[in-house]
Image: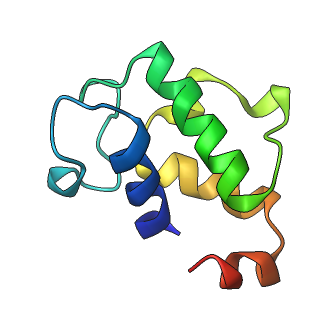
Amino acid sequence: MNAQVRSILQDTACLDVPVDTLADHDDLYDAGLSSLGTVRVMMAIEETFSIQIPATLITHDLFQSIDSLARVIEQIVPDESIATHT
């Protein structure tokens, strides 16, 4: 899942540093993630996985790191659906 999140970030987040230089726990805001970037990332996640992230989960913490994004996606997306997106 983390590889998929990295790919989405690479395509949409417009970070100040290359995504491949980030550890899974690194702070994405420190890496340059903006409020516009969070919207782009959220929309790409929803499109990629055919999901809607519940409003209650859309918080600053959700976009904190690759790990935090992957955890939430795994909570929302059925296991069999994840397998088709890898």
Q: Position of residue 6 (x, y in %)?
A: 38, 57
Up/down of 13 relative to 11, above or below: above
In the rendered structure, the answer to whether residue 85 lies left or right of residue 64 reads right
Residue furthest out toward the top: 35
Quadrant of the rendered structure where residue 84 is? Answer: bottom right
Q: Nearer the viewer, residue 77 or 67?
A: 77
In the rendered structure, the answer to whether residue 23 lies left or right of residue 74 reads left
Q: Nearer the viewer, residue 24 or 78?
A: 78
Quadrant of the rendered structure where residue 57 is? Answer: top right
In the rendered structure, the answer to whether residue 8 lies left or right of residue 25 reads right
Q: Position of residue 69 (x, y in %)?
A: 55, 48
Query: How many numbered discs sit on the rendered protein?
Result: 0
Q: Residue at x 62, y 36 (%)?
A: 42
Q: Residue at x 20, y 57 (%)?
A: 20
Up/down of 75 relative to 65, above or below: below
Pick the quarter of the image with the C terminus: bottom right
Q: Nearer the viewer, residue 64 or 18?
A: 18
Q: Position of residue 16 (x, y in %)?
A: 18, 28
Q: Residue at x 39, y 17 (%)?
A: 34
Scheme by which the image is coloured: rainbow
